Amino acid sequence: MSLRIAALPPASRPREKLLANGAALLSDAELVALLLRTGLPGRGALELAAELLARHDGVGGLLRADAAALRATPGIGPAKYAELAAVLELARRALGERLRRGRALDSPLAVRDYLRLWLGGEPIEVFAALFLDQHHRLLDARQLWRGTLTHTAVYPRELVKLALDLHAAALVVAHNHPSGVAVASIDDRLLTARLKEALATVDVRLIDHFIVTRETLYSFAEDGLL
């Protein structure tokens, strides 16, 4: 029989441990169990949390899981899904605030984490852009175009117009590959060249183009293609 949180000694229960010692000392399963609050018949919240983490390959995979994958998990109904989705959105917003407070390119890991949280779990291809000022501080982050499982149309002229409207001096663009393969296709390379050329006509620099999956990113700049 599954051990219920209520059956644990008070000092061993996740909520009491958090209140006494802080959240950092809790395990991943204990933190997720606090969100879930209840389990299923025969499986307590801790056991369900551990199964959820295993199914999605840990905390990172859980945060980047799409809605369909989460809701297909036994024990994750609308209420629990809403709570997990809220945590994901809070994490993404926290990273966005960090980028807005400082120079985005001074925090490359924060940029990558932000893009994975923002785009990695999308079930279709999405094209997005980070608009930066002359000091590379984040002005705005927008999902611009949504496509299919394998393609999304991108309109360089509209991107240039939006960059001018936002008074951006530089851009980082990104799109996801729902297949999970972060490899640049010939079309991706041609698009990057077109975007760089179009933005250069209005003196806006294309700093990088990322291809994003749930687990990895590909950078055109790091590959010497920008």
Image (spheres, grey):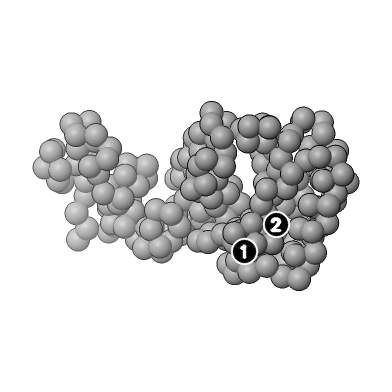
Q: Amino acid at mark 1?
A: Asp
- Kindly tell me whether residue 89 is visible in this rendering: no
Residue occupying the point 48% across, 40% down: 91
**What whole-number distance in Å separates the C-alpha atoms at marks 2 and 1?**
8 Å
Q: Is residue 68 left or right of residue 146?
A: left
Quarter containing the C terminus: bottom right
Whether 55 is drawn above or below 157: the answer is below
Residue occupying the point 47% across, 50% down: 63
Q: Amino acid at mark 2?
A: Leu
Neighbour tally class for label 2: few under 14, some 14-19, many 20 plus, Cα within 10 Å: some
Q: Mark 1: which secondary structure?
A: loop
> Mark 2 — residue?
226
Q: In the rendering, which numbered label is found on residue 182? A: none
Whether 219 is drawn above or below 162: the answer is below
Image quarter of residue 224: bottom right
Q: Is residue 203 left or right of residue 9?
A: right
List x then y, in percent, for residue 71: 51, 55
Residue occupying the point 19% across, 61% down: 1
> Mark 1 — residue?
223
List x then y, in percent, for residue 74: 43, 59
Q: Are marks 2 and 1 in contact (CB under 8 Å)?
A: no
Question: Which is more toward the observer, 223 or 154?
Answer: 223
Whether 159 is drawn above or below 224: the answer is above
